[in-house]
Amino acid sequence: MAGAGTNLIGAIRTALMNRLFDSLAPLARFRRAGRAFAAAAGCVCALWAPATAHGADITLGVIAGMSGPGATYGLGIARGAEMAVRQINAAGGIGGRQIKLMIVDDASSPARSVIAMRRLVEANVDLIVGGWGSSQVLANMGIAEQAGVPYIVAGATQPRMTSGQNRWTLCVIQTDAAMTEQLVRIVIGNPGMKRIAVINDSNEHGVANRRAFVAALARAGIKPVAVQSYQTADKDFSGPLNHIRAANPDAIVLFGTIPAAPAIMNQARDLGIKARFVGTGELANEALISSAPIAAEGAVLMTDFSEEVDAEARAWADLYRKEFAGRPEPPRPVLAAWEYRAIRGIAAPCLMSAESDRARLRDCIANWKGTLFGVRGELYFDKTGQLIQPSVVVEVRNGAFRLLRSVN
């Protein structure tokens, strides 16, 4: 009986993985993965594919903050790219052409991000997928635009990144505007969240989110009981948190990132603040739970990926964790999922049809429609280059991000 059970589990896992790769049509043939190639390290690294007789290789650039305050996010982007490219190359490449992966670390700094983008452009990459942090992307995207290089942003949310004026830049995760509207619906619809406080990073991302959220609350006739801000590099948050404690909120909407966000949660609990935390996708980072395992419990967050959405998402997340197990930094599927899906599900089919023509490649991506694991329904890019998709909301429950079907 034990042997039969094992065989059944193996058969189910195989079936799920086949469905996963089938969902990335027309790349269903990419079902077998080779061995993982070396992880990105240092400021710039190129992971070169084997030579092929089918024409010039494709060079895919990845820009991510693998050091600095955004390191946990950037590493996920780099690993998502590694996994996608390794699988594509192991299955024969794009029409016989292998993908060369060039990963550049921008140190989570806008100024360094400009330098990193110039390196990718000067290396004559065919496509760029990545970019973490709104401030970094807003600083570097003009270089890709001027050079005419398609740029799929997989880690930033500022609405100004996608507009009719930006021909070469497209974004695959929801904007701040979309997420803040969803957050307003969550807090308004929850009877336990009547008194709402806001705390935000004073950077581009935090200020934009706070303004959008407070404006949406005002349209609903609600005024926050407290609004506070902090600097990205702050370590002591007692000043703004004491103001929030005095306002006695039921919910604290936090617009920020790791590592400040879990520190704020921990210090809030130390001050006796019991309000429930609410936030956007930047907080749905596994490092939040590891850094604030008790303080983050019950937080309601938007997210860019939940493996509980469908069986294909679960199968991919299991494969991802297995592939990157044993590394110094634990594998975090939430941060890698969109980079992987953007490359395998969106970019790769277009690279197949557009070959080395950047204009055709950009137009193919802009006109892409389809389904991807972990997202319900058909997805498509609007006329500004923003991928339209449903929101995914999770709750931190028992030390994990659990898909939230109702907010209690």
Image: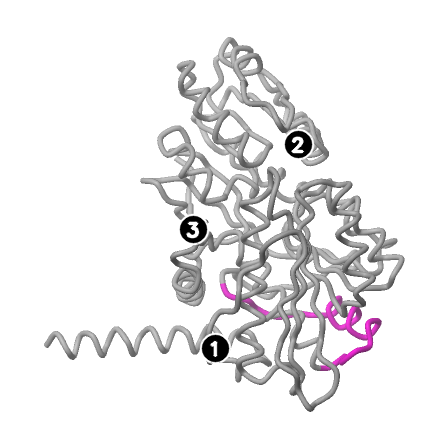
| Quarter of the figure with residue 358 | bottom right
Give the residue number, with chain letter if any, for mark 3: 330
What span is colored magenta in the figure?
A: 353-373
Q: Amino acid at mark 2?
A: Gly
- Is there CB contact under 8 Å for labels 2 and 3? no
Residue at 71 percent of width and 42 percent of height: 134
Q: Is residue 7 left or right of residue 371?
A: left
- Where is residue 187 shown, x and y percent of the image? 52, 31
In magenta segment, residue 362? yes
Q: Where does residue 79 sit, x and y in percent of width and height?
A: 54, 59
Q: Spatial distance from mark 1 to mark 2, Cα to Cα?
A: 41 Å
Question: Would you say residue 356 sits in the magenta stretch?
Answer: yes
Above or below, comparing residue 219 to residue 287 in the picture = above
Above/below status of 119 relative to 315: above
At label 1, counting other C-alpha atoms closer than 10 Å, the crowd grade (few under 14, some 14-19, many 20 or more) is few
Relative to the observer, which residue lies in front, 326 or 358?
326
| Residue with the mark numbered 2 | 206
